[in-house]
Image: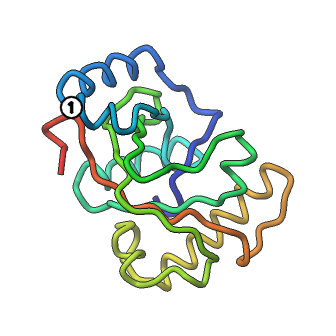
Amino acid sequence: MTETSGSSRSLPLDEAAATVMWEQYRSAYPEAVRAAPEYTVEHFGDNARLADELLGIVLAGGKRATAELVADFVARGDLIPRIGSHWIACDSTGAPRIIIRTTELRLGPFASADAAFAADEGEDDLSLASWQREHRRYWTRVAAARGAEWSEDEDIVFERFSVVWPPAHAD
């Protein structure tokens, strides 16, 4: 993203198609699903343009990390992911495109992001300065949308992931 992963609940989600994709993955990788049977269906970002832009970076292989405010998970009533959990990433129309599996997680404040994480997010010029600028803008906007004010001291979920399905896009 030039912002963050996370889900915009205002964009559509094709839950039926996501279930079909999940069943295909489950058939191919039953052990991975047994180890972490839960999954979410979401978009990157908070609008259609961002959802497609960030998904495109993932599909091209340039994005293997994302960050989201703990407060956004709480506001949606979602649990934060765990290592091994899956999410089905959809495009802006709600069509499921890939299944992502969480490979690394940590919680920390804004200042704990480093250059390696910024580069793994694959956005803008891959620099930490760009990551900080764009995420400040993004989290200020999404916090305001839920009636809150964002602070750099808030907990952030820093997540690294791999693409596991479909095989054409898997790492």
Crowding at mark 1 (Cα within 10 Å: few <14, some 14-19, many 20+): few
Find residue 93 and report its horizontal and vertical position in percent.
Answer: 46, 28
Tell me the element at label 1. loop
Q: Is residue 2 left or right of residue 21?
A: right
The amino acid pointed to by label 1 is Tyr
Residue beneath the point at 51% across and 53% down: 5
| Quadrant of residue 136 within the rendered picture | bottom right
Find residue 138 and report its horizontal and vertical position in percent.
Answer: 63, 63
- Looking at the image, is 45 positioned above or below residue 106? above
Foreground pick, 64 / 8: 64
Residue beneath the point at 45% across and 34% down: 39
| Quadrant of residue 160 within the rendered picture | bottom left
Residue beneath the point at 40% across and 51% down: 53
Residue positioned most to the left: 168
Q: Mark 1 points at which residue?
A: 29
Find residue 152 and report its horizontal and vertical position in percent.
Answer: 71, 77
| Quadrant of residue 143 within the rendered picture | bottom right
